[in-house]
Image (tube, rainbow, N blue to C red):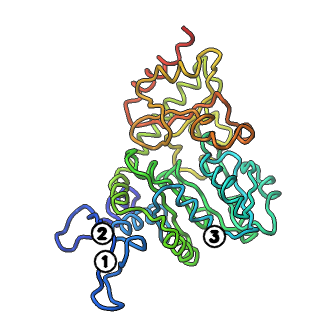
Amino acid sequence: MDIRTKSVHTGVYKDNSYNSVTTPIYPTSTFYFDALGKNKGYDYTRSGNPTRTALEENIASLEGGIGCSVTATGMAAVTAILFLLKPGDHVVTGDDIYGGTYRLFDQVFTKMGVSFSFVCMRNLAEVKKAIRPETKLMWIETPSNPLLNIVDLGAVIKVAKEKGIVTVVDNTFMSPYFQRPFEFGADMVMHSTTKYINGHSDVVGGAIIYNGKEIEERMRFFINALGVAESPFDAWLVLRGVKTLAQRMEAHQANALAIARYLEQHKYIKRVYYPGLTSHPQRRLVKKQMKGCGGMLSFELNTAKVPLNQFLGKLKYFSLAESLGGVESLIEHPWSMSHASMGKGALQASGITEETIRVSAGIEHVRDLIADLDHALKGKA
């Protein structure tokens, strides 16, 4: 079944009483038993809910996993996965990952006895060098947020498997429409469903998809015990949004490519980061492991020519806001916004500068978006 069909039909038909073509919301906290030890598959919504199950079936089918758990936020998904670890365990991850993930690793789980190596994951030798006997998890984000660096999934996952290390791929930027990490042997795939899978900036959520039964059972235990599962209302919103995933991703990608090409030629732009550009240094790898290039791009603004606040203040159709993946175009300043918690040293090490701007291309007409950018890039008055 094509992913377009899966996104519309998988997990949907749960109403046998009235044949609703949309999945009902089950807003109950608890379910009554027919008798001791006998119910209809659900007992308490923290542990399971039919609306949430519908979304889990849908996302699992899109990623090609054997199962899925959806969580209250993307960071709830990250947190739950880290509970696979114990004090003394070690994680290898990228030095250019999402700021919220970096903060959780560096400022929360280090205090719980877990250690982390933040490395350039584009350099396989550096990845290998970072591995220790106590390395239990490899956290891969590709493309990276916000510099759109690409990690070679096949190569890195192969190294991890040889050492018995669990691999997790944050696939938020690409969505399962443009990238499927299980095809390269990943153990788990993680999403912030707040972003492209929902696509309408009206809900927060996360998802963990599994490639093996044992790891699924362990993770389901943690999610239930921690109480981080997604609410029925939020699951219903994401299930509604995912139906148009394919169409939205094509529109996001078309706009992002046109914007990237425009910016690459602009005299006040120092550099553009977008996997779809022929100038991207990893173009061959992009074609090898991705089915598209997505709707995210970043660029370096020449703030000597166009002051940052002046540029951002002139924009009409790009809202200055964190998050990404919605139908509306968003723009943000990673140094002071989404990645600020990393601290100056880690930001510089990752390659993020005070002139880095991140763009989430929406689905508006690209002519209007480029005109908006052109107006904002006029230079000093």
Q: Position of residue 196 (x, y in %)?
A: 45, 48
First in sequence: mark 2 vs mark 3: 2
Kind of residue at badge 2 = Thr
In contact (CB < 8 Å): disc 2 and disc 1: yes
User: Closer to the observer: label 1 or label 3?
Assistant: 1
Q: Secondary structure at mark 1?
A: loop
User: Closer to the observer: label 2 or label 3?
Assistant: 2
Left or right of 364 in this view: 314? right
Mark 2 to mark 1 CA distance (whole Å) = 7 Å
> Can the viewer see residue 288 in this picture?
no
Q: Quadrant of the N terminus?
A: bottom left
Left or right of 2 in this view: 348? right
Q: Secondary structure at mark 2?
A: loop
Question: Residue 362 appears in which quarter of the rendering?
Answer: top left
Q: Residue furthest front?
A: 111
Residue indicated by mark 1? 31
Residue indicated by mark 3? 84
Mark 2 to mark 3 CA distance (whole Å) = 30 Å
User: Which is nearer the eye, 102 or 316?
Assistant: 102
User: Which is nearer the eye, 244 or 215?
Assistant: 215
| Residue 28: numbered disc | 2
First in sequence: mark 1 vs mark 3: 1
Q: Secondary structure at mark 3?
A: loop
The crowd level at tag 2 (other Cα within 10 Å; few <14, some 14-19, many 20+) is few
Counting every numbered tag in the picture gives 3
In contact (CB < 8 Å): disc 1 and disc 3: no
Kind of residue at badge 3 = Leu
In the image, residue 50 above or below residue 366 = below
| Residue 124: numbered disc | none
